[in-house]
Amino acid sequence: MSLARLKAYGWGREGEVMTPEEREFVLGRYREKFGRASFDTIEVARLDEIALPAPRVKPPSSIAAFCTSEPYDRAAHAYGKSYPDYVRAMLGDYASAPDVVAYPRTEVEISAIMDWAGSIGASLMPFGGGSSVCGVEHRRDERDKPAITLDLRHLGRVLEVDATSRAARIEAGAFGPDLEAQLKPHGLTLRHFPQSFAYSTLGGWIATRSGGHFATLYTHIDDLVESLRVITPKGVIETRRLPGSGAGPSPDRLFIGSEGTLGVISQAWMRLQAKPAFRAGASVGFKSFFAAARAVRAIAQAGLYPSNCRILDPAEAYNTGAADGSVAILVLAFESSDHSLDAWMKRALECCADHGGMPETGGADAHLAGAAGLWRNAFIRMPFAREFLTPAAIVNDTFETSITWERFESFHDEVKVATLRAIREATGIEGEVTCRFTHVYPDGPAPYFSFHALGRHGALLEQWRAIKEAASDALIAAGGTITHHHAVGRDHRPWYDLQRPELFAVALRAAKKALDPQGMLNPGVLIEP
Amino acid sequence: MSLARLKAYGWGREGEVMTPEEREFVLGRYREKFGRASFDTIEVARLDEIALPAPRVKPPSSIAAFCTSEPYDRAAHAYGKSYPDYVRAMLGDYASAPDVVAYPRTEVEISAIMDWAGSIGASLMPFGGGSSVCGVEHRRDERDKPAITLDLRHLGRVLEVDATSRAARIEAGAFGPDLEAQLKPHGLTLRHFPQSFAYSTLGGWIATRSGGHFATLYTHIDDLVESLRVITPKGVIETRRLPGSGAGPSPDRLFIGSEGTLGVISQAWMRLQAKPAFRAGASVGFKSFFAAARAVRAIAQAGLYPSNCRILDPAEAYNTGAADGSVAILVLAFESSDHSLDAWMKRALECCADHGGMPETGGADAHLAGAAGLWRNAFIRMPFAREFLTPAAIVNDTFETSITWERFESFHDEVKVATLRAIREATGIEGEVTCRFTHVYPDGPAPYFSFHALGRHGALLEQWRAIKEAASDALIAAGGTITHHHAVGRDHRPWYDLQRPELFAVALRAAKKALDPQGMLNPGVLIEP
């Protein structure tokens, strides 16, 4: 595949943008929301204009062939895709760009980079697709170490397929579409489709406990990992391919979610599935979000395991064009490679009916028409909006969590109220906070909040931070997790510290010290050295 | 509940034994197997005859109220229920009995014991029901530390029930039946039923990654843990109640399977279920074990998630009285609190038919009659046999593992052949090795082997060890795990060391050192200090 290069500023690859119609739809919603005919819009700094700090180090000839300090490479690896990342990149602030970007082609080359980083006291950041929304920049201010980014894109192959066990050994740098394309001839699929699917990698998914396609059961990548290979500064770790094991604490689980702090995941055996041959889907309207939530709880506790079981509150459904704002929508779907799903769907719809849910009936209900399809399309396309919303001083962001069912309603209200108040205080203008469920469990949902505020150029970073802090404070105070599937990164670290038991940090720090004695890997991520 | 005390020698509580009919059935099978009319049988050392080494330490008055060095307590905590444990106890060898058994009633008392252990350089072993089959004795020979056992039986309460989220906060010392009895008034159940259910505790299940009732999906206790409280020598760790999280490596997963080496699990929020109201069950006969395995693979990969999906090879089915030895049996069942399971069972039986599986048809097939019920009863009762088989010099033991499907058939044959050969070489008499599946996954089964040998008094320990070593060597060489759900303990340690990545041991050792700097907790379990 020959693909355009990833954008330094913006979502996806160069040349990929929203259509004029999509753009107009999104901006229209914001004009309506904030009662403005237009927005104060500035220009985004162009890549050929930005000033990068001079690289502080130069790779030795033994590794120079796969290292570069070209401006595009450094700029494109300076940030992820968090809101502050957009603001800083828009303003041409690339102070945190790495000095060198390495593109190793083998595990030996990964180790060679580690050796070099160790010899010069550099920090090393493993890099997949760069789609993180949690803040992943090198922190120059904290410790003035040379900064090297390790981009794994050249380790993108499916190395081995075991069709009998439905598993494949895959290199960590494989992007979603390429990974699926390589599996397709075998009739198999990983079916892990995070929103960032096209622009993120297997290694990134594992390192961040990515949440995928499945709303129930195999929600996180965690359960799809059969075994791992990890390159640490002390050597290679390879775990056994085992369908299940009870031999000590799971080695895989120490590295799943380690966010690049313990080692570089180089490959994994992943559990796959046959392509679905049977599907059943419905959109179900509810009078309120909480009524929909009660139906979803019933479905989650029934052991039916729908692949899709997402509810959108009325405002969220309206914003994505899935409904007219008067109803909450449940997007419900089952899929199977093996059997018809009539019995499953029938029972799930009964659970909905018990809570007043009315399925979409082929166009009769205008406010529901095509809701599932419209929402799915919006879900995939929405990240493209931020690159023009940020220059228009619109502060839009999301945060996601999980909470047990018995606390959900008060939790929802507390978080929403706190976030709305923070928007008002930070911007002086009424904002909007919407909620949907991305994943659901028998013991609780994973609520996903979006917020929309009209900011002011020159103050965007501090306005965003005030809102983010208020939302995160409320979320932690009310018992949630600071992240269900977006990871911790640098933005969530203060609240992660509050929720994570201190003695677990002590244990993790000791484990890191044993595997990465110099602390080169992502210093300051998850734990202090 | 007032219960008889746990046996020092034997399975379960004092007074609980096999009926004469059960005993005769079991011995009859062995007489037939080894072609003997009777066995050379010796007397088991009586508790009032055994000589315990004098206790080396005496608890200070501040903790004396819940500590004892009475002979019964020390003897009953000297061993678990592994084969070598039976042999040593039968012979009256209680050299590894702890000096003191503590029965703390609160977390504060657990910490007080840790403080005392630290002050006198003692080793501390957390103890649930004592049902381990992997070797859990204090090792006097390795390090001449005073040995304290921490028995958690007084922490057995269900403290809090959240019926909305279907979860409960339960103390770690709760035994299976008592735990379920406390949940019952709430209409909820943990439904984790290991073979040891009546004689093991929640804390033990979590510390050893116990495998339970469910043959698919929620196979291990791991996924049923919502949050944990763990007392370490450095303080208390409490994780958040979260239905799902992506915030760093899972803290719970570090302690799940830690076998008492990192801390003492004091309580856990556990995910529960409503009582099943719908059931569908069948016994299906197959010409061969491998044909049954192929059907089970189809079911496991179909996403049907039966609660029971166990296959017995023909000899295993015969030994337990479930069939006449001519067929392999699949014991298949679905259960739900929510919906009828006709569609599920119908499709699963189609998968069976594809591989030649014939369901039991109410007595028409004599060799299958009541197979599921007979097997289930045998499964629960079988552990009671060892206390009279060991005195008869019969060496019977089990080991369990998991392997991916594509390697399963050759794996099975290699392990079976190696074990049969070892029996022949160790005893000079042909033995038997049978296999069943306890749990199945989309990527592979968890095969569970039983072996039967006729040993010789005076040589039982070395004969058992020779067989165990050959079986374990074969199992590790062929790619399995040394344990799927029985844990590592002392007996599996050499093979655990082979399968576990060395750098994971390095990380685990560092974590242990951080939480248990004196190395008081189960020294020598999982890792060397």
Image: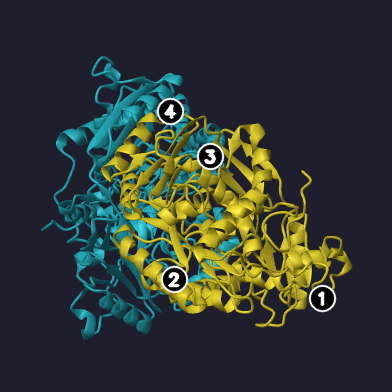
Chain colours: A cyan, B yellow
Q: From the image, state whether disc 2 or disc 1 is nearer to you.
A: 2
What amino acid type is highlighted by mark number 1?
Answer: Pro
Instruction: Decide if residue B206 is in sight here.
Output: no
What amino acid type is highlighted by mark number 2?
Answer: Thr
The answer to whether mark 2 and mark 1 are in CB contact below 8 A is: no
Q: Chain of mark 3?
A: A
The answer to whether mark 2 and mark 3 are in CB contact below 8 A is: no
Label 1, secondary structure: give it.
Answer: loop
Instruction: Mark 2 or mark 4: name the one nearer the start of the chain.
Output: 4
Q: Label 3 to label 1, Cα distance in Å?
A: 48 Å
What amino acid type is highlighted by mark number 4?
Answer: Ser
Q: Label 2 to label 3, Cα distance in Å?
A: 48 Å
Q: Position of residue A110 (x, y in %)?
A: 29, 75
Instruction: Mark 1 or mark 4: name the one nearer the start of the chain.
Output: 1
Q: Label 2 to label 4, Cα distance in Å?
A: 43 Å
Q: Residues within 10 Å of mark 3 (few under 14, many from 20)?
A: many
Discs 2 and 3 lie in a common subunit: no
Q: Which residue is mark 1?
A: B55
